[in-house]
Image (cartoon, grey):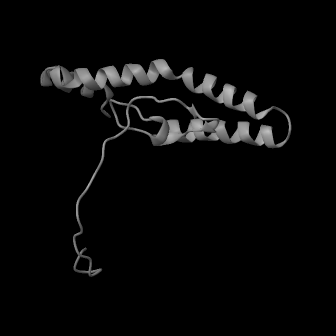
Amino acid sequence: MRDRFRLSMGTIHGGRIPTRLRRPVVDQIFVVGDAAGQCYGLTAEGIRPTIRLGRLCGELIQRCLDGAISREDALREYERRVYEHRRGFQIMRALQKMFPYIPLSLIDRIAALFAEK
């Protein structure tokens, strides 16, 4: 494909995947996605929680703009709702830390439970 589109290799770089849930409100600003650590530790999945929590954030901002709630109430509600998911993020992070110590034979059996038949 590189030859076909005349592409050249650039510098390979990467970064850490933010897997620790961070504060969803900082200095009266809504924080969503990677900036808020809204990524599941075990799977490194961040799209689903970011879409769900980003949508919530957008809905609260819209309610604020419509005059239905105050900015402070929107920030407080967003923070409360994000923290409702805290336990799930913590469990996934704990599993991520344990994963290297699980015997491969057990991982194979667990994976087989979820495999298509």
Vertical position of residue 80 compared to residue 56: above or below: above
User: Residue 21, how many percent across, how many down?
Assistant: 45, 29
Vertical position of residue 102 compared to residue 65: above or below: above
Q: Residue at x 73, y 30 (%)?
A: 72
Q: Which residue is drawn at 24% across and 68% down?
A: 10
User: Residue 34, how many percent across, how many down?
Assistant: 45, 41
Q: Which residue is drawn at 44% across and 39% down?
A: 46
User: Residue 108, how many percent across, how many down?
Assistant: 19, 26
Q: Quadrant of the C terminus?
A: top left
Left or right: where 82 falls relative to 41: right
Q: Residue at x 34, y 34 (%)?
A: 43
Q: Quadrant of the N terminus?
A: bottom left
Left or right: where 46 falls relative to 83: left
For the image, the number of numbered tags is 0
- Pick the residue in front: 116 or 28: 28
Left or right: where 11 falls relative to 67: left
